[in-house]
Image (spheres, helix red, strand yellow):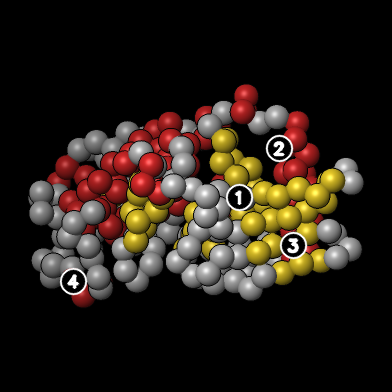
């Protein structure tokens, strides 16, 4: 996804986007980012590496990967300059999430509410109130408030989904193994990567609030509880 720079003089807000394929905060030394803070995005037509700056950010990135209604997202997506209490300030949100509803959402991720000071609270309130006037939303997410099981299940699914990657639904085996409700443990070792990819894409469903075990139900329709979606998060 690519966006045009935008501004509103009356609001004192300017949003500047970097060139395609680049991050807004160029001062980041990518070679120094810890390996565990690198993820893979399955959302684009081709796999791409996602570079995060913290454990909280990589955990949030994994959750985005497991939300079928998220079309695409970018890390360090833009520079937001804004006026607050008479002072000009600059902000680099951690993510920009697109779920196809014409209101992409900038997201700032913190590990715990204790890391959210008054400056961040004031900034969040200002941007949450005013960015919709420019066609965007703004959301502050603290990872400690999200279910640990959901984060762990996302990590597990992504590990299984790495290879082989399902390119088209026609790649599915024609033995009917994915055409009826089943359990996670009933899949053969060679079928698990496909099952994980179908869960990520929203073609199969599990209860993300329960441990992913051999007896976990894999259904063809969304479960009554434990469905992970961007709409439910925001």
Q: Distance between the residues labelled 2 and 1?
A: 11 Å
Q: Which of 38/206 is in front?
A: 38
Tell me, yes or no, whether the two marked residues, 1 and 4, touch with CB atoms within 8 Å.
no
Label 2 vs 4, first from the N-terminus: 2
Q: Do the residues labelled 2 and 1 touch (CB within 8 Å)?
A: no
> Disc 2 to disc 4, how far (Cα)?
47 Å
The nearer-to-camera label among 3 and 2 is 3
> Which mark, by number, is residue 93?
1
- Examine the rendering and report whether any part of residue 152 can be seen: yes
Query: Which sits in the foreground, 102 or 85?
Result: 85
Please state the horizontal and vertical placement of residue 131, each as a whole percent of the image.
Answer: 74, 58
Estimate the spatial distance between the alpha carbons at disc 3 and disc 4, rounded to whole Å: 45 Å
What percent of the width, then of the height, locates residue 206? 34, 47
Frontmost of labels 1 and 4 is: 1
Q: Residue at x 71, y 50 (%)?
A: 90
Give residue 77's quadrant in the image.
bottom right
* Residue that carries the numbered disc 3 in the rendered image: 14
Q: How many residues crowd mark 1 within 10 Å: few (<14), some (14–19), many (20+)?
A: many
Residue labelled with disc 2: 120
- Which residue appears at 30% of the width and 48% of the height? 158
**Mark toward the start of the polypeptide (3 vs 2):** 3
Q: In this rendering, is residue 104 above or below 92?
A: below
Q: Distance between the residues labelled 3 and 2?
A: 18 Å
- Cα separation, mark 1 vs mark 4, equals 38 Å
């Amino acid at each position: 996804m690519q966006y045009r720079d935008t501004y509103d003089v009356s609001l004192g807000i300017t949003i500047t986007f970097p060139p395609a394929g680049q991050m807004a905060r160029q001062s980041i030394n990518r070679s120094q980012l810890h390996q565990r803070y690198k993820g893979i995005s399955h959302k684009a037509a081709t796999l791409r590496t996602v570079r995060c700056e913290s454990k909280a950010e990589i955990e949030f990135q994994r959750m985005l990967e497991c939300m079928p209604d998220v079309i695409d997202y970018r890390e360090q997506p833009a520079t937001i300059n804004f006026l607050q209490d008479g002072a000009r300030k600059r902000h680099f949100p951690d993510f920009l999430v697109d779920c196809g509803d014409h209101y992409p959402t900038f997201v700032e991720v913190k590990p715990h509410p204790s890391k959210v000071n008054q400056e961040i609270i004031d900034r969040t309130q200002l941007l949450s109130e005013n960015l919709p006037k420019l066609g965007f939303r703004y959301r502050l997410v603290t990872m400690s408030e999200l279910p640990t099981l959901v984060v762990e299940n996302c990590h597990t699914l992504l590990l299984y989904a790495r290879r082989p990657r399902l390119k088209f639904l026609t790649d599915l085996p024609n033995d009917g193994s994915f055409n009826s409700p089943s359990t996670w443990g009933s899949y053969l070792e060679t079928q698990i990567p496909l099952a994980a990819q179908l869960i990520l894409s929203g073609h199969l469903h599990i209860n993300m609030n329960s441990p992913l075990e051999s007896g976990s139900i894999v259904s063809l329709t969304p479960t009554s509880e434990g469905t992970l979606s961007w709409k439910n998060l925001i």
